[in-house]
Structures are given as C-alpha cells and as structure tokens.
Image: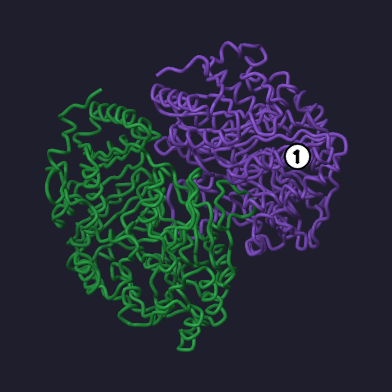
Chain colours: A green, B purple
Amino acid sequence: MSLSPSLLRLAAARLRTPSLAAGVASSSPWRLAVGHPRLAVGPVTAAAPAFLARFMASAAAAAPAATPLTLPSGLRSPTDEDIAAFRAMLPTPGSVVTDEDALAPHNTDWMGRFIGRSRVLLKPRSTDEVAAILRHCNEQGIPLVPQGGNTGMVGGSVPVADEVILSLAGMASIEAFDAASGVVTAQAGVVLEALDTYVGERGHRVPLDLGAKGSCQIGGNVATNAGGSRYVRYGSLRASVLGVEAVLPSGEVLAGLTSLRKDNTGYDLKQLMIGGEGTLGVITRVALACPPLSAAVHVTLLKVPSWANAVSLLAAAKGQLAEILSAFEFMDAPAVKLAVTHLSHVRDPLGPDEDAGATDGPFYVLIETAGSSAAHDREKLDTFLESSMESELVTDGVMAESAGQAAAFWELRESLPEAVGKAGTKVFKYDISLPMDAFYRIVTDARALLADAGADADVVGWGHMGDGNLHLNVAARGDVAAVAAALEPWVYEQVAAARGSVSAEHGLGVMKAGAIGYTKDAVSVEVMRGIKALLDPKGILNPLKMLPRVGEEKTA
Amino acid sequence: MSLSPSLLRLAAARLRTPSLAAGVASSSPWRLAVGHPRLAVGPVTAAAPAFLARFMASAAAAAPAATPLTLPSGLRSPTDEDIAAFRAMLPTPGSVVTDEDALAPHNTDWMGRFIGRSRVLLKPRSTDEVAAILRHCNEQGIPLVPQGGNTGMVGGSVPVADEVILSLAGMASIEAFDAASGVVTAQAGVVLEALDTYVGERGHRVPLDLGAKGSCQIGGNVATNAGGSRYVRYGSLRASVLGVEAVLPSGEVLAGLTSLRKDNTGYDLKQLMIGGEGTLGVITRVALACPPLSAAVHVTLLKVPSWANAVSLLAAAKGQLAEILSAFEFMDAPAVKLAVTHLSHVRDPLGPDEDAGATDGPFYVLIETAGSSAAHDREKLDTFLESSMESELVTDGVMAESAGQAAAFWELRESLPEAVGKAGTKVFKYDISLPMDAFYRIVTDARALLADAGADADVVGWGHMGDGNLHLNVAARGDVAAVAAALEPWVYEQVAAARGSVSAEHGLGVMKAGAIGYTKDAVSVEVMRGIKALLDPKGILNPLKMLPRVGEEKTA
C-alpha cells in the first residue's frame, strides 16, 4: 500500500532549511546540558544561556515577584548555628551554599513567578546526609523545600519564604541496571535525559519524556508524578516506578527500593511519595521499569479540519495503530501561528492556513509510533493514513523521513510554551484534564469570553490529547488584571462542571494549592491533611504546597 | 518465513480429544456462571458444582478448620438489636442473611482453610447503604469483613471470628462505558468475567485476567491489586484503575470516581484502597481503563531444556515480540506431570518427557501475543520461534490453531492449582517475587531440602515469569507438620535474602500478616500502622488482616 502524494508530501522537500536542520537541542529553554542543572551555576542573567536569560528576564519583568508568604507558626528560620550544624553534617566542600548570588536561581522558579528568600541551600551526597538534615530540621522546626531540576510549573520546588533549600543535584549516580528486566536504579538527582541516554545505550527507554528532560531530575519527576508525551503508550509512573527510597520528615528512611514488578505486601507507601510533591518525604532513590527501545519510530504531523475530526482520528489511531501508538499530541492553529511568528527557529511543515484563528480548527496532530518492525509499523501507518484521508478526517500531512525531521516536528510541539511566553506580557497557564466532549470547548469559550471583555490576548490550546490532557494558555497584554479576573475562577468552574481535573500533570505546588477543592471532594482533602499530619506533624516539609491552608479551600 | 514442522507440530492433530474439546469453562474450580458468585447459593456440598464440592471437601478434610482468632479488645459481636438495625437500613428483601446454612460458604474460603463463625451477612444495594452499615458499626465498635467473590488465597475475605460479613454481590451494575477512552465504570460486585465480556462486546479488554475470573469481583480485584496473566502486557492495576469510590470506616464516602487518565491533585488516595485488602475502606465503585481488544491473538506452548534457556527466551520474547507480547507463563515439568496425572480433562500437548522430575528442566513456557494485525503478529512470532529453535533455546513447541486449542493450552496452565490440591493431603502455597537469578533456584532448593528430610511431597513451580512472579507449591502427604516445619520460615528467609517479596500478587490476608517483615522494613510497617489508625481508629474493618499484631511481626 502506498500513500497518496497529495496527502503526504514528503517532509524532506519542505524542511531542509538551516534553522530546522540545527535540530532541537539548542533552542528550547529546557534543553540544556545533561548533568548541569540549568539554574545551578549562578545568577540567571549571567550564567544561563543567552536565550534563557532573555526569556526569563522578560518573564520576570512581566510577572512581578511574588511576595514571600508567611509560614505557619511553630516553624523558624535557620540560624547561623543551624548552618554550622549543616556544615558538620555535610563534609563535602560545596555542600552548604549561602552565597546570595549562588542562591538566586534556586530561590526562583524558571519563569520567575515565585521568588523566595532562602539563605541556605544544602546539597547532600547520600541518603544518610539527607536523613541527618531532616532529623535536625524536624527537631528544630526548620522548614525545607526539596528541589530537583527546578523545572516545575506551579512553584512547588522553590521557597515561599526562607525555607532551607534541599537540592538533590549532588546525588546523581545511576547505581544499577538489570538487562533482563530493564529496571534501572538511580539516585534522585539524575537528570531525566541522562537516564534515558544511559538506558538507551542498553536497549531500553525511560517510559517518560517531557520538554524539560535536559534539566529535570528523576526524583522530581517521581515526586510530581510527571506525565509527558509517552504517557499514552507507557502509562503512569505509578506503575513504572517499582521502588522508592525516601527520607521522612523525622529523618527515618522508608526503605522501599525494591526492583520487583509485583509486590503485594501492605499499603503501597511509595504511591504517597509519587506525586506527593515533596510534602511527605524526600525521595532519594528510585527503581524504574524501562521498556525495550523500539527498533522503529515514525513521526507524522497531520492537519485536521475540525475538533470532531480530531476526536475521530484519535479513536482511529487507538484502533488501527493500537500497540505501536506512542504519542498523540494536538496543537490548535493559533498556537502554531504563535510559534512560527515569535520563534525564528520554528517552522510549520504544513504551512499557514487561511482558517488559522478560526474558533474551531484546523488542528495539528503529531502522531508517533514505536514498534519492533519498521516494515510492519509503516504498513500500519500507511493504512491508517490512507483511511484517514479517504474518510476526510485528515486534510494534509507530512511524515518525517529522518531523525532530524522527527525532532523538528517535536520541536514545533515543544516550542509552544516558549512561544506563548513571547506573545504576552503575562501568560496564564492551565494544565487540565477534561473528557473529550468538553475538551476543546473550554478554549473556544475562553476565547469568546476574553473577546467579549475586550481583552488583548491570544487564547491557545495544545496538549496530550491521547490522555485527555489540555494545556490551555492565555498570552495577555495590556490590562492583565482584567484578564486574570475574567479567567479565574471561571476556568476552574468549567473544569469542575465537566468533572475534569484542575491539574492533570503539573501538580498543585503553591500556585494551585487553593484550587484542589474544585475537583476533589472535601472528605479526600481531609484525609490528605490527616496523612500530612501523620508523616510531618510539625509541617516542616515543603510548607504551603499542595494542600490549601485551612479556611482557604475553594470548593466547587 | 515458515516454521519447521519438526518444531511446530500443529496442535490440531494432538488435541482433538473430547475432554479438551469441551473447553475451559466447565472444569476449573473457579470458572462458574457469570453473575452468580460461586458460594452465594447455599451450603458448599449441596449447591456448589459437583467438582467443586469434591475439591473443597477434600481440601477441608486435609486442612483442619482454623480456630477462630480473638479480636482486639474494644470490638464487640453484633447483637439482635444490631441485626434489627441492619434490617432497617437495608429494606430490600434478602439483604440481611442470618441463616446458618446460607452463611456457611461465606464463613470459609474456597479452600476451606479459614473458617469463621459470623452470624450475619449484609448485602447492601448502594453506596449509601454501605455507608449506613459502616457508620453504625463504627459507632458501636462492631467489626466487619468486606467480601467480594471470596476467591482469595490468603484468607483475606472471610471472618476470623464473628465479624459481620459485608458482601458486595448486591452491587453488580456496570454503570457507564466511554467508547472513546475505553473507560468502564462499575459497581464493586461485578464479576470480572462479566466485565470483560461487556467491554469485549464494545471492542475493549479488561487489563486483568486470572483463573478465578468467573467468580471474583472487580471490587475485590482492586482491593487486592490482583495481578494475573495480562500483567506483563498491561501492567499494574495501579495505573489502569482511574477512579475508586470507597466508604471509609467512619461511613464517609471517598468520592474518587473520576474516569480521567491524568489527575495530579493531591495524594493519590485510591492507591491506599488498591491493594489495601479492605482494611481501610470498602470499595463500592471503580473506573477502569480498558485497552482496545486485539484483532489477533496467538498462543504457543514451548518446551525449554533448562532454566538458563527459559531466562534467555524471556529476554528474546521481550525484544522480538515486544509490543505484542501479552503473556509469558512458565510451568516446570513436575507441575505439568501432576496435572496430567490427577486431572482427566487435562492433556500435555507436548507429551511426557523423560527428564520430567529432573531438578532443572525441562520447562514449559506459554506465550500469548495480542496485536492489531494477524499477519504481522504471525510473522514476528515465526521469526521469534525460528530463531529460538536455531539457537536451541527451545526444543519443542505447538501453536494453537483455534480458539479452542488456545483455551486448552491456558487450561493446562490454570489447572495447576487444582492438580496440586489433588496431589497432596496438604498443599503449601507461596506466591513470591524473585529476581531472575534466584527465581527457580528456590524450587530446586526446596525439593532438595524436603528430600533430605525424607518428606513425601511434590515440589513444583509455575507462574508469571514475565513479571518475576513464582508460584511455589508443595503438595505434601504423610507427616505434613514436618514439611511445614521444614518450609517455614525457610521459604520466607530465602525470599528475604534474595530481596524478593513474600507476596507478589495474592496479598497478605490473615495467612501472611505476620510475614510482612521479611520483605518490608520496620519504618514502612510503622507508617502502615499509622495510616490504619488514621482511617480506622477503632479497627473495625477487616481486623487481623494484612498488618501483623504488635509483637508478632517476623522480621528478616
């Protein structure tokens, strides 16, 4: 079976431009050198790569520094005596950082929206050192914030006041790999991309991929139950993570570092650490099941005329591509337009469309397949694409003919956060789960809402459609306070009404802690409080994150 | 590519016997009518199918009735007044069962090893009724045991004394199915096979399969985090279960019945209910993600000369069959021999082997593939089988050429528990996880241990090799107390030394509650106790299950 040339113009003809040939690695704000966390080397404007510094400066200018919050009573700031005690616990030079410039990038998130004023960062080299730190802080009532790659979206990994910053960057060893099972055991500070490269060289693949892979750390990925673009194939970390070692606030070690695929002996405590956002314990080591690397990977970019067609295409892909489907990402045309307008290194392989900016469609869909036979996979893909074209689900498309082209298609998708950052003086970001019937409606409704209000804003949507996960982004200019007032709590109310989730994969952090009640019932929130009090009775670990302060819950 | 006839004798020629043609449904102790829980209809010996009655009678005779245990202080037996209160809460006729004969099958597990003396079974029809029951029992300090299909292996679903039995059999509605996502929402009492049939008619497949499918209930499956033979493909229920509604001991409802694939808002409380063995709450409804039904399923049965070859074959299958591998089950030759010796309806399609009974090998491996293209899958399978034969990993094999033959191969595998039940006057069963290098050694070591002790016993092994899950079974005759003394704690010590798990998929129940310490650290057990105390401060729910009584922990 062969493809109609009218549908599948080969990407080669359109993509051989220098800017795309340069590939993915150099341009994204997240993709920096493996093993060198982006913000760990000095003040942002001095040490970060040129692009990043520019991006962060504009973001910081747009979003005024958050006022440090007041910590709950019973907690106290670290003193010089505490710092001396930390130095005694952590004998390796460089493990206790108090220099203000060196601390700056750890006191703020990568978008510059949350700015703490911690005066000390600790960089333990072992689980025992983490335990010693926590024991001391728990005895003394000193709050801490665990920090991995600090690439989060909700301010979960930065201080809200002057908490001690507990960096995991000094614990970055890959400790074991079992070739038979594909299970890798690593310390929390290993950068995701380094881990993927390591297991990739051994014929396996980390079941997790996201834009921040060059900076984020596996411990932070697990602590936030990170999702990303391989989720549609490999599912949740809740099944892939086999073991977690974590230090409790008391300093006791939860020694759960098993690498067994099955273990039904008691409550699965690691699940409290997975997605616990560092509020119950500090993850120090993880064991992760990595599936075999696929011999064949195909990436296609398709244009779909309407939302209804996109939904039908997803169903067709699940049915026909089935076991080889490894990503199904969607982008609306206004999002793609922002990327090609604001980012010189990004091209739209399918070209502009007259309908771009229309309220419903066209949409771009990126489909990746991964399988063990290139010939079989290509045949399935050809059949799928031909039938999609014949049924007019799809109007145009390109298939990557090289790894570079595949990377360029992914770059278009992964450049969207950067693009909206450039398009607005303030960006409102919502990472939500919605049922398919309500999925895109919230984008068109938000667009209409802001147009009626006379706001100057781009409202765009993209996301992991195969998992029901929408990234609704509003790039606002001018009166951003009016835009904020129009959007919130309207967005959360819409999500609650559709029985969605106010945070699909980003977590709650400090940004959305108060919004949990929109999509979680009051009994659940009370049980969560009980678990927090059980494991962290003094509340030293990542205070004011994830759970709302009593009396500040918003409920639907 | 075609297969060598010398390797793949077609199964048809060997399997066309009336006993196998009759299929799977009638002969297994677990596969009974869908929707009619096996033991819910009256006394075992009167109402259970003939085979089952025979089997249970012999099992009960072999294993003396467990002496009812003493419940913790602070709990009390239900009185006539309580029963009157239950009748008022549950107005549907038949919801409150006090007849001794009717209660008998609910007071004992299917193997007759654990026998309680409850005087009342409640059969609520709604979540509200479950909540009313728990509220009353919590106020009054009356203990309960939740019961699904009562097919468990560790006495988790039967009373240990005179607890109220809370049956979920009256809540058996499939409430919703989303064709786009494959998510099914069902009440806890739906029988697994009925659920699989329902979603199967709609093009999907429950990501869980086990021998007890005809009787076990989805609520019990989730409460025990059931594993089974599809685990190697679809992974843990911890990722497939999207939502859980559960009633807490207080009577409050944990309203977590979302059907979203992604939701990172707070601690994932449903994970405490999944595998919580009914000790923290009563699961009333679940939402489960069901993958698309595969167009093509192939089942092969292979003979492998040594354990080293079996390990290599697993690696080859993961590499070459990759995304279509849906089961990799192993059986040792002595296990197969027991099945064909003791069960008239079971045949060995590969015939007897002179080496049967040898300490290491031969082994039988059942491989199932499931994919979207029969042609592609067959080609992958042919290539895999040919290379396995050429490299002499495999010495013999058959491929099922019909659904009936496929079912017969599975029947051989699933008949093994029944076979060992017939082979011994007492059967010692261990469901353990072990790393591959230690996996089969424990079987040969146990065989040597018992031979040295002069015991009259068959020591056999089978299990979900693709998931590192071994079922070590010892069918003992004669001095079974001596066999018991030789096996325990030796088995647990071996598992602990190999960093395995003392319960891979069966859970702990009352049988293994004291063994948790062999493969879980003391800090974890203390945190589990804390969570139990948080959610069930009076300890009314499934007492003496899963967690060891204080002072009775065994630690490695």
Q: Can you identify the residue that label 1 sits on?
A: B448
Residue A400 found in image quarter: top left
How many discs mark residues in the rendered view? 1
The N terminus of chain B sits in image quarter: top left
Given the current orientation, which residue lies at the most extreme front position?
B391
> What kind of element bears circle 1?
helix
Q: Mark 1 lies on which chain?
A: B
Q: Which amino acid does label 1 sit on?
A: Ala
Evaluate whether residue A556 shows in this view. Answer: no
At x 72% / y 53%, what residue is drawn? B515
Residue A193 % position (x, y): 35, 55
On the rendered structure, is A378 left or right of A542? Answer: left
> Above or below — where is A404 with respect to B48?
below
On the question of residue A167 being in view, the answer is: yes
Left or right relative to A141: residue A155:
left
Identified at 41% across, 49% down, the residue is A199
Name the one closer to the observer, B427 or B93: B427
User: Horizontally, is B180 left or right of B278 in the view?
Assistant: left
Residue B60, image x and y in percent? 83, 35
